Amino acid sequence: MKPEKVVFIDEDLEKSFNELNESDPVKKALIRAINLLQEDAFSGRNVKKNLIPKSLIQKYELNNLWIYNLPNG
């Protein structure tokens, strides 16, 4: 399976991620999660449609949502 492309939902989030120190455990966990999600976009748990916040549906035009728990998160 071809790895999926990773896109940050907004520029501020991407900027904050890039500003994290490479040795930061949070950044390391996020990189591991990104790599896993690139290989299998269905990693994690699917959120039932009626539990997706309406604000996210409207703002980002979502039709599904998956949760991936980070270690110590």
Image (cartoon, helix red, strand yellow):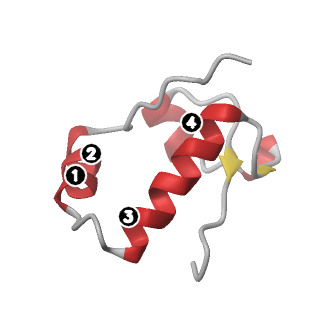
> Decide: marks 1, 2 in contact (CB < 8 A)?
yes
Would you call the spot at circle 2 few (<14 residues within 10 Å), some (14-19), or many (20 or more)? few
Q: Tag 3's secondary structure?
A: helix
Q: Which quadrant of the structure image shows residue 40?
A: top right
Q: Position of residue 17 (x, y in %)?
A: 28, 55
How crowded pointer 4 is (Cα within 10 Å; few <14, some 14-19, many 20+) is rated as some
Vertical side of 51 occupied by 9: above or below: above
Closer to the chain start, of discs 4 and 3, is: 3
Q: What type is the residue that disc 3 sits on? A: Lys
Mark 4 falls on what kind of element?
helix
- Secondary structure beneath label 1: helix
Asked whether residue 2 is in view, the answer is yes
Query: Quadrant of the rendered structure where residue 20 is?
Result: bottom left
The picture places residue 47, in percent across and down from the top left corner, at 77, 49
From the viewer's side, name the closer residue of 67 and 40: 40
What residue would you read off at disc 3?
A: 27
Sequence-first disc among 1 and 4: 1
The x, y position of residue 18, in whole percent, is: 22, 52
